[in-house]
Amino acid sequence: MIDAKLIRSEPDRVREALARRGAGELVDAFLELDGERRRLQAAVEEARAANNAAAKAIAEAKQQGEDTSIPIARQAQLKAEQATDEGALAEISERIRRLMLRMPNLPDPTAADGMSEDDSVTISTYGQKPDFGFEPKDHLELAGPDGLGLIDIEAAAKVSGSRFHYLLGDLVRLELAMVQWGMDKLTAKGFLPVVPPVLVREPAMEGTGMFPEAREQAYAVEQDDLFLVGTAEVPLASLHAGAILEEAQLPLRYVGFSPCFRREAGAAGKDTRGIFRVHQFDKLEMFVFCLPDQSQETHDQLLAIEEEIAQELGFHYQVQNIPMGDLGAAAAKKYDIEVWLPGQQRYRELTSCSNTTDFQSRRLDIRYRPESGGPRHVHTLNGTAVTSSRTLLALIEYGQQADGSVRTPEPLQAFGAPAELAPRTI
């Protein structure tokens, strides 16, 4: 959430910044509502003062044995006027709250301009496109029913519908090795492992900026007023909701492992083949709480970790500076790593990392106590380490051999991955 004081004090700067995201008009809408709110607040305070004066007049009249009917009637009128103003104030305060929830974060000056993914800016490339010496297959040809039989989409469709899948045999071992390898790498870098809850209440979704923007992407458990998270970012961000942290504690680094659930609303017909875009997958997610002057450096560090992971797994990729129109509401700036997929013969998003500055911490009321002055809001950042969908998919395609077998990267073998994926036996 943007600081309302900043909008009031520097409306032109905020309007110009949000105009890059196509949301500049929200500033004027806020200023109009905020002006009306302040008028009503003054009226309510005036009415309360008048009520207090009327009550005092009634008490004095009673003490002196005077007729109190006129001051009592006046007080009743004042109470009615106060109730009307308080009702109007509550209504406009709620309208402001809903408007503020629609207002995205201020973009970083260095975030790419543009309103679609086509406007992404490539800032670096690593490695060369793999040359197998044969026509490469995609992950489903290699690991699906006509290959190793380790991905079963048809059985999952009978059980759960489209965009679900079973992982079987050595693919399960490969995923677990990949997660354990990633967890080991990140704990060595100071991240605390977390297995968070994946059912959360609405304030957690609003607090991270998932709601209202991406509400249609979330699975709801209506009977219990809970939502399945699409990323561990949500419960990790909410871990310190309402807390005041000590400056010396920061930065706090967490790495969460969780299943993730996404309805993929609006994705009909997109990436329906295989496990690239699915409703359920596992993910290792990095999350950092830091001081405001640490967030830019921390963002670069998260990107460096993602690149280190991609490089050690043997991927060819490019790093993209994501444009305004493709940022989530909370992000001020986002980098994507796009891996070259041999089976699709194109770059596809593998991981991303975002700097959300103080947007989430304002909504979740997460602050720190500096050495001098009052508490200030921390900055929060998030980044994907590995997933059971896209990282696993890329491992399959990069490990393919001419005979249809699939070899795994050496770093994962020390964590239980087989050197070569064995075909399904039952």
Image: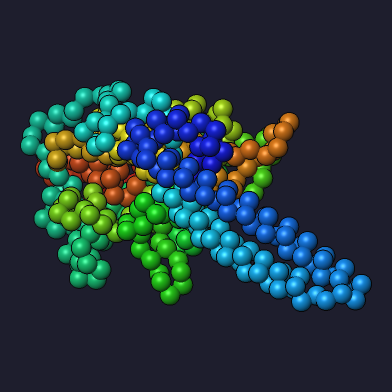
- Spot occupied by residue 420 in the image (x, y as percentages of width and height): 25, 45
Question: Which image quarter is the C terminus in?
Answer: bottom left
Regarding residue 415, the answer to whether it shows in the image is no
- Spot occupied by residue 405 in the image (x, y as percentages of width and height): 17, 45
Total numbered labels: 0
Residue at (28, 45) in percent of width and height: 390
Occupied quadrant, residue 226: bottom left
Up the image or down, 346 lies above or below 69; here it is above
Q: Residue furthest left?
A: 135
- Spot occupied by residue 1 in the image (x, y as percentages of width and height): 49, 44
Name the one closer to the observer, 176 or 341.
341
Regarding residue 51, the answer to whether it shows in the image is yes
Residue at (60, 39) in percent of width and height: 377
Residue at (32, 38) in percent of width and height: 22
- Spot occupied by residue 73 in the image (x, y as percentages of width and height): 71, 73
Colour pattern of the rendering: rainbow
Whether residue 379 sits left or right of residue 307 in the image: it is: right
Name the one closer to the observer, 334 or 127.
334
Residue at (56, 58) in percent of width and height: 89
Up the image or down, 250 lies above or below 387; here it is above
Whether residue 255 sits left or right of residue 320 in the image: it is: right
Whether residue 83 sits left or right of residue 385 in the image: it is: right
Name the one closer to the observer, 206 or 271.
206
